[in-house]
């Protein structure tokens, strides 16, 4: 009986401490960028689905930029099943960190996001 209770406690602690998996993995290439105020910086945002069959629309992605503005984007293009890319061009408007936040909300796994900080001088 004591062994069963101890096992249950250990299992409960593991489940509470286990890392939370995001709905999707969002990455950038290049992973770091910089430029001068007024420059246009080009990078690729990539989304890899967590689930094989995603309930969200491919374009159900928000892109917020602080300290700059989106000049253009290619739109989300399917590279292979469950993997999408979007080439984004951001014009740097302020010195310091320009932040690009790509995020989406999944009812099953919560919000996933990728943040790219661009150093503007």
Image: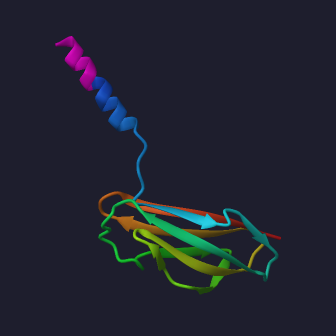
Q: Is residue 13 magenta?
A: no
| Residue 107 position within the rendered picture, expressed as x and y whole percent measured from the top left | 30, 63
**Looking at the image, which residue sits at the far front?**
80
Overall secondary structure of the magenta section: helix
Instruction: Measuring from the top left, give residue 23's x and y in whole percent.
Output: 39, 60
Q: Is residue 6 magenta?
A: yes
Q: Give above or below for 49 relative to 6.
A: below
- In the picture, residue 96 is in which quadrant? bottom right
Residue 73 visible (yes or no): yes
**Taking 61 as reference, is 57 left or right?**
left
For the image, the number of numbered tags is 0
Left or right? Give the position of 63 relative to 21: right
**Quarter of the N terminus within the rendering:** top left
Q: Is residue 97 left or right of residue 111?
A: right
Q: Position of residue 75 (x, y in %)?
A: 51, 84
Confirm whether residue 96 shows in the render. no
For residue 40, side relative to residue 58 (left or right): right
Q: Nearer the viewer, residue 64 or 78?
A: 78
Q: How is the image coloured?
A: rainbow
- Part of the protein shown in magenta: 1-8
Looking at this rendering, what residue extends furthest in the left direction?
1
Point out residue 65 in the picture as x, y percentages from the top left corner.
60, 75
Q: Is residue 72 above or below residue 1?
A: below
Please identify the quadrant where the C terminus is shown. Answer: bottom right
Identified at 22% across, 19% down, the residue is 5
Residue at the spot 43% in from the left edge and 43% down from the top edge: 19
Vertical comparison of 87 with 97: above or below: below
Q: What is the quadrant of residue 97 in the picture?
A: bottom right
**Residue ranking furthest to the top:** 2
Q: Answer with the quarter of the image where residue 118 lies.
A: bottom right
């Amino acid at each position: 009986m004591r062994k069963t209770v101890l096992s249950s406690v250990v299992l409960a602690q593991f489940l509470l401490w286990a890392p939370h998996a995001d709905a999707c993995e969002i990455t950038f290439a290049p992973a770091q960028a910089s430029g001068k105020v007024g420059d246009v910086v080009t990078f690729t945002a990539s989304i890899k689905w967590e689930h094989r069959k995603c309930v969200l629309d491919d374009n159900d992605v928000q892109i917020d930029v602080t300290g700059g503005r989106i000049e253009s984007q290619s739109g989300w293009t399917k590279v292979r099943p469950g993997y999408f890319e979007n080439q984004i061009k951001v014009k740097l408007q302020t010195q310091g960190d320009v932040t690009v936040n790509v995020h989406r909300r999944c009812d099953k796994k919560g919000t996933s996001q990728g943040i790219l900080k661009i150093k503007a001088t």
